[in-house]
Image (cartoon, rainbow, N blue to C red):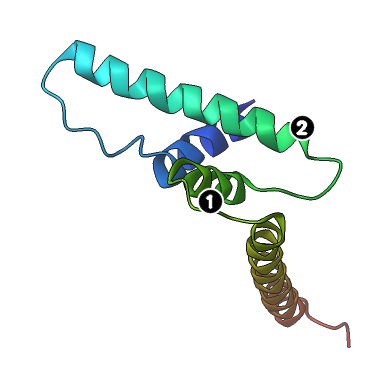
Amino acid sequence: MRWPVETALEEGKSELGMDHYETRSWRGWHHQMTLTFLAHHFLSRLRLKYKKTSALTLAQARVLIDHALRRERLTIRQALEIIKYRQARNYAAYCSHRRRTLKINRLRVKKPK
């Protein structure tokens, strides 16, 4: 149960501004955390709703919401291009990390004589 909690806190800090509060009162801090948790819940539900179609990450869902809230006129094609680009970059990073990890593990294993 520890890992999902740490993931939620990391996503909250990196994507949703959980660590960007500047308040002096308990009420202000509580308000900031409530909004952050509400945003995280919304984006998590959005991610689960579209889980069958693609591996939409929280960061990708946030980018789409950011564009929608700024009222930028994104066509469906533009939105799909943004997601396609991000997923390609994520996959390239995954492959690079995987190759590096496998290479390190191969160096650690000693061959029997």
Specify whether 9 is left or right of 81.
left
As drawn, 80 above or below 105: above
Label 1: how many residues lie within 10 Å, few (<14), some (14-19) or many (20+)?
A: some
Query: Label 1, on which residue?
Result: 63
Give the residue at mark 2: 49
Q: Residue at x 64, y 25 (%)?
A: 1
Is 46 situated above or below 101? Answer: above
Where does the image place residue 68, in percent across and percent down from the top left?
Answer: 52, 44
Q: How many neighbours does mark 2 have within 10 angstroms: few (below 14), some (14-19), or many (20 or more)?
A: few
Quarter holding the C terminus is bottom right
| Distance between the alpha carbons at the discs numbered 1 and 2 | 17 Å
Whole-percent x and y of residue 28? Answer: 21, 18
**Which residue is drawn at the image coordinates 88% and 82% (left, top)?**
112
Work out whether residue 109 or residue 56 is closer to the camera in this orientation and state it: 56
In the rendered image, the vertical position of residue 6 relative to residue 28, given as above or below: below
The image quarter containing residue 109 is bottom right
Question: Are the residues tagged 1 and 2 within 8 Å (C-beta)?
Answer: no
